[in-house]
Amino acid sequence: MVRGALGKVYKDGEEIIRQGKPGESMYVVQGGRVEVLQHSKKGREQHLAYLEAGDFFGEMAVFEKEVRSATVRAAGEARVLKVDKKTLLTRLREDPLLAVNLLKTMSHRIRELDREVSHHKKVRL
Amino acid sequence: MSLSGQQSVADSFSQLVEDGEKEFNLRDGSRIAVVGGGPAGSFFSYFLLNMAEAIDLDLTVDIFEPRSFKYCGPAGCNHCGGIVSESLVQILAAEGIVLPRSVVQRGVESYVVHMDVGDVAIESPVHEQRIAALYRGNGPRDGCDTDLESFDDFLQGMVREKGGNVVRKLITGVEFRDGRPFLDFADGEGEAYDLVTVAAGVNSKFISLLDNLPGDYEPPKTTRGYICEFHSSKEEILRILGRSVHVFLLSIPRFEFAAIIPKGEFATVVMVGEDLDQELVHAFLNDPVVRRTFPTDKVPCVCSCSPLINLGARKRPYGDRIVMIGDSGITRLYKDGIGASFRTGKAAATTALFHGVSGKDFEQHYWPTCKRIVNDNRVGKVMFATNAIMKNSRLTRKAMLRMSQNEQDSAGAKPHMSSLLWNMFTGSAPYVDMFRGTMHPGFIYNLLKSVTLSLLPESDSAPVKKKAV
Ligand SMILES: Cc1cc2nc3c(=O)[nH]c(=O)nc-3n(C[C@H](O)[C@H](O)[C@H](O)COP(=O)(O)OP(=O)(O)OC[C@H]3O[C@@H](n4cnc5c(N)ncnc54)[C@H](O)[C@@H]3O)c2cc1C
């Protein structure tokens, strides 16, 4: 269900960012659902997560000059708003507490990743 | 004096400092009053409660707001053009705040600049709807049947969810009793608080009550704006105005800024300027360029007002246990008042929570945010003065049109003039960034080239290209 009214509408399956491509902006889902996935070296797709209204992605590109680490595409019709690097960094200078909101999600993702890694280790053992 | 004696002096001194600090710190059970539940009051309360929750601090926040934003017409409206700037939309998104569809009357992707010499559509640099056109109340008079939700009501809902109390009472007085601010309510009751946050805007008598307080709370300078809501069918408004905001660069004497904003079945006409009166409003609405854009003589104006607009900063928007935010304190010149309410509201909340509520705390931690706005407004004044000179000459109007049209028409061109006009009209960037843009060699070169080409006789008869909106 599309909830917000701003940003851009992406059709089902349309790519918003692509793994390996450079990028500067962060994105915030305004409505609908997007899928985060990774392509293995053999080209296989691995589903990582679904994100919904209020969730963001692509934030790593704001803080480091690396290529995108995952592909994100619309899962059904989705509305997504682009947040410019400059706008975000300028605001962070005036209000470092804005980072808390970003850090909360990022630390949650690290926790999820930890869980995933230890699960895989257990399986291999 | 013995060593131990020295230590005890040091200890008692630091104890004294600590006690002084504690006296002005918010703690469990602290009571905060917010006078005014517009954007500034709501943003302040939301962030204060949100951050207090994160550090397990139990605060009581009472927002006093006599108005219900569920009403349509003047009773539920905080009189404003209702544009939420591109920068604020992005920051709200980064804060996890999604503006719902019921609140956003129109997502704006382009601005059309109208001049007597022609029009040019300036697209959003990212080709996305990142500007929101909305209503502060439940829409204009006659608009009660439409299924829209008020922006101010939406923000108040966020505060309620965080545990804030919205109290439907008018505040009629403020004084200090035993070092604490005491508020008088219109019903004859009153209460003392640990902190009073003034977010009553500039269209309130409450502002003049602050003059009676100890401290130099000289009120901000104001002038009047003008807003009129024209009513037609949704289809007709869409047909005439498209999805763009329409702005005007006209050489009417004393004219500074006006916009026509499509919002569903209404079109909001907004005018601001230092010297605005009925005569100027009339001249604008009857100007051929305006009539060509929107038939102001054929569509009825169902709701109009002339609210005050904050033109200058308070010198000292804080004191012990009192702080002024949004329009009551400091705002951006002519643009992005809601964005300034957000910035000052959050900065005041952060200061109160993490540093304390003394005048010194606000001076050290809240004032820098205000000062940034004040300094930027100074540059803004220069930008508006330059704009006034440019728009008053037909030659420079033609040059501005030519330059922005060229940029919009050729894909790879650097959008020097388009960015300037976009930022100037949308209020998305600080004035200082716009000023820097005008110092760019590319901007100066292209402007001079456009002026020269506009001097050529044939350019007068050159067809004016109008981009589809
Ligand atoms: C013509 C015009 C057009 C504008 N257009 C835009 C625009 O398009 N975009 C933009 O960002 N900004 C715009 N602004 C500026 C914007 O309206 C203000 O900057 C913004 O409303 C400030 O928010 P605030 O919360 O400080 O004050 P306000 O929105 O004025 O809210 C103050 C609140 O305090 C309440 N109040 C007042 N007195 C008392 C009291 N004694 N007791 C209890 N409550 C009280 C009022 O009822 C009100 O709800 C415009 C302004 C004008 C005049």
Image (cartoon, coloured by chain):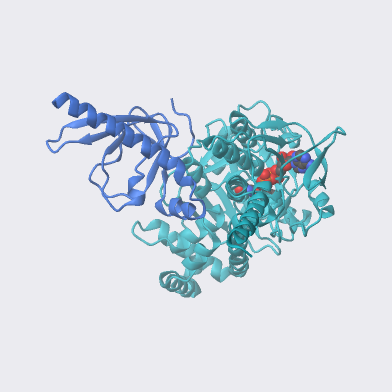
Q: Nearer the viewer, residue B29 or B146?
A: B29
Residue A76 position, x and y percent, is 35, 27
Residue at 38% x, 62% y is B414
Q: Is residue B325 left or right of residue B173?
A: left
The image quadrant where one finds ligand 1 is top right
Does residue B249 appear anywhere in the picture? no
Which of the 4 image quarters holds residue A122? top left
Position of residue B259 relative to residue B398, above or below, is above
Of all residues shown, which one is farthest toward the front?
A: B2
Name the tint of chain A in the rendering: blue
Residue at 58% x, 62% y is B3
Does residue B280 appear anywhere in the picture? yes
Of all residues shown, which one is farthest toward the left?
A: A42
Chain letter for the cyan part: B
Q: Is residue B224 left or right of residue B295?
A: right
Q: Nearer the viewer, residue B411 or A18?
A: A18
Position of residue B399 relative to residue B137, above or below, is below
Position of residue B284 relative to residue B136, above or below, is below
Residue B386 position, x and y percent, is 59, 69
Which of the 4 image quarters holds residue B360? bottom right
Which quarter of the figure is the N terminus of chain B placed in?
A: bottom right
Residue B398 position, x and y percent, is 52, 66
Residue B260 position, x and y percent, is 61, 47
Of all residues shown, which one is farthest toward the right?
A: B188
* Label tally: 0
